[in-house]
Amino acid sequence: MSANPFFETWDTPFGAPPFATIAPEHFVPAFERAIADHRSEVDAIKGDPSAPTFDNVVGALERAGRALSRVGGVFWNLAGADTNDALQGIERDMSPVLARHWQAIGLDPELFARVEAVQAGRDAGGLTPEQRRVLQLTYDGFVRGGAKLGDADRARLGEIAERLAELGTRFGQNVLHDEKAFTLVLDGEDDLAGLPPALRDAAAQAAAERGLPGRHVVTLGRSLIEPFLRFSARRDLRETAFRAFATRGEHQGEHDNRPVVAEMARLRAERAALLGFPTYAHLKLDDTMAKTPEAVRGLLDRVWDSARAKAAKDAEKLAEVVREEGGDFALAPHDWRHYAEKVRRRDYDLDESEIKSYLALDNIAEAAFDTATKLFGITFTPRPDVPVYHPDVKAFEVRDRDGAAVALFFADYFARPSKRSGAWMSGFRGQNNMDGVRQRPIVVNVMNFAKGGDGEPTLLSMDDARTLFHEFGHALHGMLSDVTYPSIAGTGVSRDFVEFPSQLYEHWMTRPEVLKRFALHHDTGEPMPDALFERLTAARNFSQGFATVEYCASAIVDMAFHTLTPEEARAGVDPAAIEAATLDAIGMPAAIVMRHRTPHFSHVFAGDGYSAGYYSYLWSEMLDADGFGAFEENGVFDPATAEKLRADVLAAGNTRPPEEAYMAFRGRMPSVETLLERRGLN
């Protein structure tokens, strides 16, 4: 075909994708050519008649597949942030094709023989520490992927990988279907009872975007449904909205994710057995900081007991308010946020609406930039000339203190029907310094904030503001990466270490040095009053029992699915029964629901990223609770401490094991007690 942008050089600022000229029909031909090119590159590596060396095997593998990375970088970002029917069809078709391609490379015996030969001679190869690390990770990846298995087992692994790719794609698209399909239309003042002006504006904007001008709509985006559950005086409407939110992916028919989960759990257990591991969790944790399922459950159980006790005390306070208001019902999941807000007002004189009036999106985004400037000397300059994939997206040029180019950053903050729920950091292009050429990354932050009404600013909750800082912490990890080889760049680190930089960055959001400058009233421009800041600080750990219970329950259920033995999985997997039995065993409070119930647990089932790994947020919180102590001890913007963080963690990628990286930064390993203290659970 003619004029396919992926077959041309991109003459755009920073080499950014020319989104306006890229159409869905370009992707399949581009993928097909890129896959063929990559296969040819790999064939040349394994067929090289010269003796295997780091450069002609491992280095060559690092160079290979650049065309495929370019196509995939655009496609997968659009599939998550601005999809449509055509892109979803391509995603369904290409996922198994790509899985088959990568599996064939990972299981190629001739290629592995050359990698193995380089590994065997590593001590005589004069390799740099970074090269030794890349070699070890490459070798381990082949072995963990099945390269040492016999022909029949390798073939079965390929079949499993292909099918899991299909199922993961289906899972994610089913969740998006249910999220797009639900709207709660609010008719008249009775339906709007209790909703503050900013939330009414956001609901009106959501209605207008869905062709309902003059109406108000609640969607299943967290930035809209959570404040609705908090403020709505209509218990019946709260129940309707919450039920839709909690049962995404759990409806009979073609979009039911329960059979998808059952098959995925069985295939993952089979894959682990083929590779010599007792369960899939053992396989996934083998190269993490936690190492074993037992270590993960030890952390989760230690935190769970404290969190459940705290939640029980909080529930008594909420029930007290219900009784005071004349309510004659037991606290239900759709009640918790509503009555927690009332208790927070009563006990801390805090009103979410008052807080949000000081948290305008533009100011909080600027605060994230300014914090990075103070810590690392980098600057952010708007670049309206850079092409973007949606009008809501903004581009920023990132430069270092010496003026050198660091990265290109895209900010995509608003919810829309074409975007999957949640918040994440991703990249259109990764960083590397191979062959003397510095490739600067193109990084994107994607959120789902409810847009303010016409002419009104978008106001954030404290949770929203922390989410923005969290994802920007990931972005810094990607942007400040400074390694030679692409496979170890940026966030390409152990799953239970990757959340450390992002969760650490959240701490600056609530520092007075930041809030005093950027928490400005959206009407008057006045800074947040000292009295309000003090009340916020006093209430810092309010409802931590609830938050920790809903999170830990999800992490424990994740582990339950992935510690199934192959025999248990073959006997039949009933996702609803496993979820219910697991929650019953740990004493899940009736008034709290998992943060991510199984049929919409996209972290775990829409791909393999966080399978047996959702615990990693808590593991990383152990690190960040202790790690921020370095700044508290030396100054929250101390240059020397910031430079250690940049050099030992952010710039270093996966050049060393995570334990060594953390020790280099902090000089010690953390303990769970620090985490419990931070959350007010000890």
Image (tube, rainbow, N blue to C red):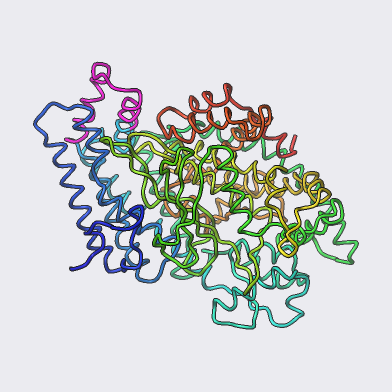
Quadrant where the N terminus sits is bottom left
- Residue at 78% across / 58% down in the picture? 341
User: In the displayed structure, does residue 46 sit left or right of residue 466?
Assistant: left
Q: Is residue 341 left or right of residue 282?
A: right
> Relative to 602, does residue 661 appear above or below in the rendering?
above
> Which of 673 and 354 lies nearest the eye of the viewer?
354
Can residue 57 be seen here? The reply is yes
50 in relation to 480, above or below: above
Residue toward you, 339 or 574: 339
Asked if residue 153 shows in the view, the reply is no
Quarter the C terminus occupies: top right
Task: Report x, y in % for residue 69.
Answer: 30, 50
Magenta range is 110-137
Give the residue at x 73% y 62%: 230
Q: Quadrant of residue 205?
A: bottom right
Q: Is residue 236 above or below residue 570?
A: below
